[in-house]
Structure formats: C-alpha cells, structure tokens
Image (cartoon, rainbow, N blue to C red):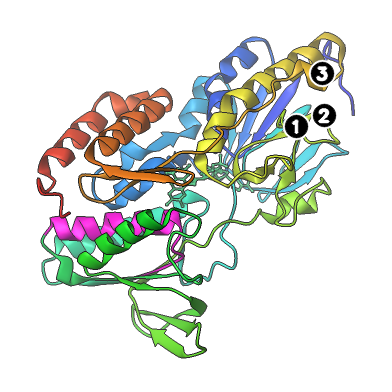
Amino acid sequence: MDRSPMTEPLHIVLVGGGHAMLPSLAHAQDWTDAGIKVTLIDPQRWLYYSGMVPEHLGGVYAVDDIRVDLRRLAHRAGATHVTARATALDPEARVVTTDEGETIPYDVLAIDVGGVNPALPDAAVGTKPIYRIRALSPHLKQVLDAPTETLGLTIVGGGAAGVEVALNITGRFAGAGRTADLSLTVVEQSGRILPGFPEGMRAYAARLLRERGATIRTATTVGQVRGADGDRTQVDMRTGTGEHDTVHPDAVLWSTGAVAPPLLRESGLSTDERGFLHTTRRLRTPTHPRIFAAGDCGTIPELNLDKVGVHAVKQGPDLRTNLDTTLRRLAEDGSAPVASALTAFRPYPVAPLVLSTGARRAIWTAGPLWMARSWFLRLKHWVDRRWIQRYAPEQWGAAGWRSLVAAEAASDPDGNE
Ligand SMILES: Cc1cc2nc3c(=O)[nH]c(=O)nc-3n(C[C@H](O)[C@H](O)[C@H](O)COP(=O)(O)OP(=O)(O)OC[C@H]3O[C@@H](n4cnc5c(N)ncnc54)[C@H](O)[C@@H]3O)c2cc1C
C-alpha cells in the first residue's frame, strides 16, 4: 500500500470539516502547491459556528453570518470536496468508504467528525452535528412573522447549550413583545440546570428564563418522543418521584450531550467508552502514525477534556502543524515523523465559556467563577466575529457587520433584565 512519492502524489484526506479542521482546510493550498492531493469528505457544505448559533436563534445574526462555506474553502485551496458521509475507516488498508459507495485511499488521514446526540428521536431536532439545530429557524421566523401564531418548544437537556438556546429564544420573543406567545420548557434529568457550573450562575440563568415565562423541569427524564397527529409532537416524561406526564409541543430540541459516531469504534482504532478516538497530545492515534483526530471526536486520555468548541478551536492550529510535519516527512523519506517532531496540544488550564443571555448581557464562566456583564457580550461578539471572519471573509466583509450593528441597536435598551 506504500506509494512512492516519486510516482504518485501524496494524498491527505480530511474527514469532517469541523471547527478543528478549519485551519488545515484554510491553509491546504500550501499542500496542493507542493503537489499533494487534498480531499475533504463532509456531507455538509456549511459549517455553523457553534459560538454564534444560539444568537442566530435569538435573532442577532442572519444565517450567512454564522457559517463557513467548506466547499468554497476547499476549492479555493485546490482541494476536492466529496459531499458524502464517511461510513467506514480502514486503518490497515488506508481507505475511507463513503455512503455514496466511494472508496478513497489516503496516505495521511485527519478526522474531525464531532459527536452525535445519543438516542436522537426522529421527531426531535438534534444539536449535533450543529447544522441540525438550524431546522428550528424557520419555525421561529414563521411564528414571529405572524402576530396570531404561538410556539410550544421543549428543550431536552439543561446543559450550557440547551440553556443558552433557551435564553436566546425567550429573549427574542421578549424583545418582540411576544412573551405570551412562547411556551418554552427546559427539561433536565439531573436536579438542576447547568450541572457542573457555579450555583450563582445557575440561579441567575433560571431567574432570567422564568422572568421570560419559561418553565424549568428538573429531575425529569424524557422517554419517548413521537410525531403525533397534526403538527404537534408527543413527549413522554417521568419525574424523579416516578410520575408520568405527556406534553404536546410544536417542536422538541434534543440537547443531551454527545456520543461518538459509530464509524470510529467500527474502525478498530482504540476508543474510549463513548466511542471517541484515543489520541496522544500530538492529536495522533497511538497505534497509527498517519491517522490524526481533533475536536469532539478525539479523546486524550490524560486530559479528559469536555466536548466543547473552545478545545476544538484551540486544537486546530496544532492539527494543521502536525499534518504538515507528517506530509513533509513522508515526502522526504516515506516515513512518519517521531512523536517529538510533532507539536503537543496544550489546553487552557480552565476552558472559559461565554453564554449570551438573549438580552444585552453575557455570562462569562471559568471553573468556579462567573459574572454577567454587558461588556462580556460585546467581547463575545468581537471574538466570535474575528474568528469567523478568517474563514468566511465573503459573508463578513459586507452583511455581517451591518446586521450585527442593526441587531444591537434594535435590541431593548433595558435588556429585559
Ligand atoms: C447550541 C450549541 C452551542 C454551543 N456553544 C458553544 C460555545 O459557546 N463554546 C464552546 O466551546 N462550545 C460550544 N458548543 C459545543 C461545540 O459545538 C462543539 O464542541 C464543537 O462543534 C466541536 O467541534 P468539532 O471540530 O469537534 O466538530 P463539529 O464542529 O461538530 O463538526 C463536525 C463536522 O463533521 C461532519 N461529519 C459528521 N459526521 C461525518 C461523517 N461520517 N463523515 C464526514 N463528515 C462528517 C459534520 O458535517 C461537521 O461538518 C455548543 C454546542 C451547541 C449544540
């Protein structure tokens, strides 16, 4: 299977154009200029930037503001975008198979397929991969455009993602003077929303949600979610005391954390108990020096990091450097570099998180600390825009700044807080 660099070009295959893959994709022209073949496999054309998605649902950003055109990035670099889902990885034969039946050989493989929602019911909108959540947008717009329409929304999962989405949607209805037209419920199976976050932050977020008419149901587990007659969905729940309840919202958002896509475990590569690929700090699999993984789909056992975009984004440049080093070494003498030639990933000591409250404040939190301030929201907007502008200069050159400024100017000066 080894190919001679003299006869055939090296081929790097990027499976999944997630947050951690963007630096590699954006700089892939360095590889194609050197005669290396680059292929991106991703069924989606667009990557939605997770930091901005809740505010998209909150009406701050238009859809074009929050997404990166993977196909354009690939084509601009002279790479091929295969619009398909990888269904199998064979580390011994060094091939990737897609759901289109294509078999794609590689010399170097980088994987960034993220996670999937565990047990996602057909009748619910998923949050992983994040493009799925966009399905809520038309619903929200339809209701907000029609003064007589109402929306019943159940968010299953009261972690940071579910709560930030709830804050932004309730904030949008409050800003439109339509609080009464939204019936939003957050269902969390543990005894409190935002488990793992500071108690004061939890109380603050819960207060905001309740002030805007939302219901919070803790110690409650969602069982079946079924498409019922008409437009409504049937959600069966069980409380901590064993009582059963059934509600019929218009839409259900499934924000229950992440497990790994099955193809990782099925590859025979070493994985953790949730199916995420083991890697070293060099973002390389311990057994196959030509296979790398980054973002949510990888697990570095000694770090055991949360599955958050902050880590995926920080890993991106290291992944790119290590792929570059590997390709150079293979081109030179056909061997993979030793570990010490690669860059070791160094995570933030504590991963900071900034959640928009759907009004004119954001909550900043790191470890046991938290604060809610208006300038955190401005800082968040600045950081998010700077990040996405690197990969989406076309969108952000024009409409992005304008729509943001307009949204901030139009929002309630009292911030509903
Ligand atoms: C609502 C919400 C808000 C969030 N906000 C934050 C935040 O503010 N801060 C933070 O740190 N984290 C946040 N997160 C978490 C963050 O979204 C993830 O940690 C991050 O997206 C992980 O990035 P990734 O690079 O691992 O992969 P992803 O960005 O998830 O991308 C995976 C890519 O792989 C593709 N793919 C999937 N399967 C296949 C396959 N079989 N073959 C080929 N391609 C495939 C997908 O189409 C996608 O393009 C949020 C999550 C949600 C749901």
Residue 162 belongs to magenta span: yes
State whether label 3 is within 8 Å of ligand 1.
Answer: no
The stretch of residues the image draws in magenta is 154-176
Q: From the image, tell me which residue sits under label 1.
A: 284
Magenta portion: prevailing SS class: helix
Return the residue at label 2.
Answer: 289
Instruction: Residue 366: give x, y in percent of width and height.
Output: 45, 41
Residue 144 picture location, percent across and down: 18, 61
Mark 1 packing: few (<14 Cα in 10 Å), some, or many (20+)? many
Which badge, 2 or 3, is on the more N-terminal residue?
Answer: 2
* Residue 301 visible in the displayed image: yes
Between 8 and 207, the one lying in front of the other is: 207
Q: For this rendering, which residue is in front, 5 or 174?
A: 174
The reply to whether the residue tagged 1 has its Cβ within 8 angstroms of ligand 1 is no
Q: Which residue is mark 3?
A: 337
Q: Are marks 2 and 1 in contact (CB under 8 Å)?
A: yes
Q: Which residue shows up at 22% across the image and 56% down it?
A: 171
In the image, residue 52 lies in the stretch drawn in magenta: no
| CA–CA distance in space, label 1 to label 3 | 11 Å
Amino acid residing under circle 1: Arg
In the rendered image, the vertical position of residue 163 relative to residue 18, given as above or below: below
